[in-house]
Amino acid sequence: MKLRSIFAALIVFTFLFSACDKDKKDPAPTQEPAPAPAANSMTAKVNNADWAAFIPTATIQNGELLLAGSNASRHAIALYTQNDNLTAPGTFSAIATFMEMPQDTTNGPTWMNPAMSVTITKLDLTAKKVSGTFSFSAIAVPGTGASGMKAVTNGVFTDVTIQ
């Protein structure tokens, strides 16, 4: 009988002490910070699909930037600033192309925007690195097999090595 009384008392105390803890709440989940873009990277969305260049390249000749990259599916994006003397970050007019290159060929369906702009957020000519953003809508180039439009959005290039 004594054992039942002790056991009953333990149950009552457990219930009372656990019932008093109503204000305790689970901590709110914390938002993970977005990862920083990787160095020597070029990414975008093409018609809302993720696109990332294997190894983007950049060259500056006569003050004009040519930035290009291709992904595993042989889809390439190229940006070419024109009539600018790149010496500092800024927004520059450019020609943009998106090309699908079938296996064993260098030509394929091509879309182009001859009047877009690219924003260069970092231009370090000493370290030979360039970073920035871009977005454009491109129309099909006749005779290439392309049709419709391509929407290239959220374009980012980070510390791409200038050759």
Image (tube, grey):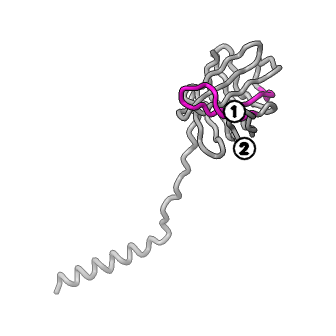
Within the image, what quadrant is residue 105 found in?
top right
Q: How far across and how far down the image is residue 75, in percent?
A: 60, 33
Image quarter in which the C terminus is found: top right
Residue 3, relative to residue 114: is it above or below? below
Which secondary structure lies at badge 2? loop
Q: How far across and how far down the image is residue 118, in percent?
A: 75, 30
| Residue 148, numbered label | 2
Q: How far across and how far down the image is residue 12, in percent?
A: 32, 80
Q: How far across and how far down the image is residue 111, in percent?
A: 71, 35
Q: What residue is at 73 percent from the left and 27 percent from the top? A: 120
Question: Mark 2 belongs to which amino acid?
Answer: Gly
Question: Mark 1 belongs to which amino acid?
Answer: Thr
Is residue 146 something one can see in this rendering?
Answer: yes
Frontmost residue, 64 versus 16 = 64
What's drawn in magenta, residue-wise?
90-112
Q: What residue is at 17 percent from the left and 81 percent from the top? A: 3
Count neighbours of disc 1 (C-alpha within 10 A) and say few if under 14, some if 14 to 19, many if 20 or more: some
In the rendered image, residue 78 lying in the magenta stretch gets the answer no
Is residue 133 something one can see in this rendering?
Answer: no
Q: What residue is at 73 percent from the left and 30 percent from the top? A: 96
Q: In this figure, which residue is indicated by the disc labeled 1?
A: 144
* In this picture, residue 92 sits left or right of residue 7: right
In the rendered image, residue 95 lying in the magenta stretch gets the answer yes
Observer-side mark, 2 or 1, equals 1
| Most common secondary structure along the magenta stretch | strand
Within the image, what quadrant is residue 161 found in?
top right
Frontmost residue, 75 versus 10 = 75
Q: What residue is at 54 percent from the left and 26 percent from the top? A: 104
Residue 110, relative to residue 87: is it above or below? below
Within the image, what quadrant is residue 152 found in?
top right
Residue 145, relative to residue 106: is it above or below? below
